[in-house]
Image (cartoon, grey):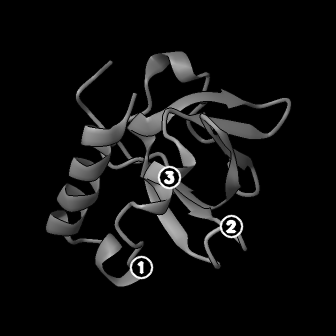
Amino acid sequence: MSDNIWGYQPTTGHVPGTDLIGYKVEATDGSIGKVDKHSDDVNSSYLVVDTGVWIFGKHVLLPAGTVRTVDQAERRIYVDLTKEQIKDSPEFDKDKHVGDAGYHEQVGGYYRNHRA
């Protein structure tokens, strides 16, 4: 697995430019929500997942490197994380998320230490 937590692995089946908004997101142990926003930017690819009622409407930022598979036909994204790991992740901060390298380093560091 590549060290770039902010890039999609070539084996995921993700086609850059595909609109992933609305895709369901599956952790290793069940569904966690759906994609609210995403980016294919080189070295800054991510998903913002709306967890709905699962963790009280929290939004989480998932670096693209946590994605295991993108199933275009089923409109599902499978990540190499458990629900608990996602629940315990740093809170998504829409203000820091753009242009704050320190915030991305914090989020990236958390997921580097927790992916399978």
| Res 73 label | none
Whole-number angstrom distance, CA of label 3 to CA of label 2: 11 Å
Residue for badge 1: 94
Q: Is residue 88 above or below residue 58?
A: above
Q: Nearer the viewer, mark 1 or mark 3?
A: 3
Whole-number angstrom distance, CA of label 1 to CA of label 2: 20 Å
Identify residue type, mark 2.
Answer: Trp
Instruction: State the residue lying farthest toward the left.
Output: 102
Q: Quadrant of the N terminus?
A: top left
Whole-number angstrom distance, CA of label 1 to CA of label 3: 22 Å
- Please state the horizontal and vertical placement of residue 95, each as a whole percent of the image: 35, 84
**Position of 41 compared to 32: left or right?**
left
Identify residue type, mark 3.
Answer: Glu
Of labels 3 and 2, earlier in sequence is 2
- Label 1 packing within 10 angstroms: few (<14), some (14-19), many (20+): few
Residue for badge 2: 54
Identify residue type, mark 1.
Answer: Lys
**Position of 43 compared to 13: left or right?**
left
Q: Quadrant of the C terminus?
A: top left
Residue for badge 3: 84
CB atoms of marks 3 and 2 within 8 Å: no
- Please state the horizontal and vertical placement of residue 17, each as a whole percent of the image: 60, 42
> In the image, what residue occupies the spot 29% across and 78% down?
96
> In the image, what residue occupies the spot 49% across and 32% down?
80
Q: Is residue 69 above or below residue 89?
A: above
- Please state the horizontal and vertical placement of residue 91, each as a whole percent of the image: 39, 73
Q: Is residue 74 above or below residue 9?
A: below
- Please state the horizontal and vertical placement of residue 45, each as a whole percent of the image: 41, 47
